[in-house]
Amino acid sequence: MDSDKPLRIVVVGGVAGGASAATRARRVNANAEITIFEKGPSVSFANCGLPYHVGGEIKDRAKLLVATPELFWKRFRIATKTEHEVVAIDRGSKTVRVRTTQPSDGPTSPADVTETDVPYDRLILATGAEPIRPPFAREMPENAFHLWTLSDMDRLLKFVHDNTVKRVLVIGAGFVGVEVVEQFHRLGLHVDLVERLPQILTRLDPIFAKIVAKHMESFGVQVLTGESVASFELDGPRAIAARLESGKRVETDLVVIGAGVRPRTALAAAADLTIGPMGGIVVNESMQTSDPSIYAVGDIVEYTNGVTGQKGLNPLAGPANRSGRIAGEHAGRGSSEKMGGVMGTSIVRVFELTAASTGLNEQQLAKSGMAYRTAIVQAASHASYFPGAENMHLKVLYAPQGGRILGAQGVGGEGVDKRIDIMATAMAFQGTVYDLAQLDLAYAPPYGSAKDPIHMVAFAAINDLKEHPRLLPPDADLSGYQIVDVRTERERREMPLEDAIAIEVDAFAERWNELDPTRHTVVVCHTGKRAHVGACWLAAKGFKSVANLT
Ligand code: FAD
């Protein structure tokens, strides 16, 4: 590179990662020549906001355009070329081939396609992910849509505006699918949600996902899990129903497919950049690919997992922005902070519930071969005597040795976001459940409790680690156990537990000696709190093996 010439930084893709990279590069290098090529019509739009405009919660479409090419130029002197697709990288000559297509003048004249080679000194790839098109949607019916770009959203809304839509079928119960369900319900439409896997929102463990699914059903949404779409039943170009593998038929006027995404790596693969086993581009901690002049950021890369240290995909906006910033800085000045581990911290609003998680869930931990234990508590969002407290379920997954936090999940009303972010923060510092129990959190009755849900779940986990008593998961096999039910008579009537010996918690001090101290014993109540009291009594009275059902 000729040192008199300005550094030429070319960015491919101008939304989350690309826009962050370009602006950071400018902030660290005032002389560089920075260009963004974006194949779509807009840069820096808020794709996370798309579902909320569909339902009218974000009323003004213009609010989704976070920054415009004019602003990029005016404030940053970054040249932003929309409707310019990078179609090839020549690493030898350090150029990218850029294609622009001018629409044709009429049906007989062909579109005017121009290709130009543009040189770079540093290239930043931020081409994002693309929606997976399942086999039944190889040919998309006229009324079937993805929701991934502004243009997708515009076409979807135009269809809703121009047609009578009463029933919507959403295929795929990931974040986007679930958000879209809520927004169509908001528009007064009937919504069916079909998910191939046995549960919705697979970042959650099944018990938590079930709470969310039931909540959706309470709003009239039909949630069909473990059901695959086999084909569409067409009337002309439109789908009027989906046939499921089980034989069920779901009628519809409009279909939204959210069946997952895959990294858009064709450009990088064609340039022989190393692609990892998970299908993302391999990068180092400065976001450099196998070619140090080329960076990759966002949904196309394999991040380092903050818990396992293994590489994996995590198509989320936070890591895309952070990795973009790091790549932009490194490209602009040759050094940067290192990209930290990604926990996959995520959150979604589902009607009146919030569901959030961070780190690994049980299935991922089992797959990675890491030993773990779990504790779940039910707690109020703030002091229960102060009006407006909302219930939440909070779960922590931790290492049996040392109690390092491996993951956490929360489902409930107000305050779930705060608790999951606390968990993610503690995990970033390799925190343990012992650390959680010691956290000095802000408290006044409208905001929390002197013993916050974070403390409560940590106490439960610490009791488990100290076997004071140990916890059994809610789906544990209790055969062979002496089961002690400490709930009230009314609770037992409403939800009977077979083969259990009933001793209400307040009668424990008198009646514990009716139990056999030589047997494995598990104490059970509704949330685990009273069972803990009962189990502590028994342990203190010399029972050899006592557990609490969490
Ligand atoms: P993108 O933001 O997707 O940008 C990639 C850009 O590259 C695209 O504009 C594309 O047109 C362009 N491009 C691709 N190939 C080329 C090429 N060859 N030449 C030129 N340009 C090219 N994440 C969250 O964390 N929370 C949420 O609530 C959330 N909600 C979402 C809701 C929706 C509807 C969607 C679609 C995504 C949501 N996400 C959410 C995910 C988040 O938006 C992505 O993880 C993030 O945008 C990824 O950033 P990126 O820069 O890697 O890719």
Image (cartoon, helix red, strand yellow):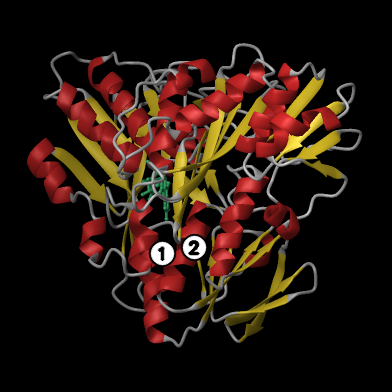
Q: How many marks?
A: 2
Position of residue 507 relative to residue 391, above or below, is above
Pointer 1: what residue?
Answer: 152
Q: Residues within 10 Å of mark 1 (few under 14, many from 20)?
A: some
Q: Amino acid at mark 1?
A: Asp
Q: Residues within 10 Å of mark 2 (few under 14, many from 20)?
A: many
Upstream in sequence: badge 1 or badge 2: 2
Q: CA distance from mark 1 to mark 2?
A: 6 Å
**Residue 291 position within the rendered picture, expressed as x and y whole percent measured from the top left:** 44, 20
- In the image, what residue occupies the spot 16% across and 26% down? 27
**Residue 268 position within the rendered picture, expressed as x and y whole percent measured from the top left:** 48, 34
Side (left or right) of 510 relative to 421: right
Q: Is residue 473 visible?
A: no
- Foreground residue among 225 and 14: 225
Pointer 2: what residue?
Answer: 146
- Foreground residue among 109 and 538: 538
The reply to whether dot 1 and dot 2 touch (C-beta < 8 Å) is yes
**Of helix, strand and loop, which one carries label 1?**
helix
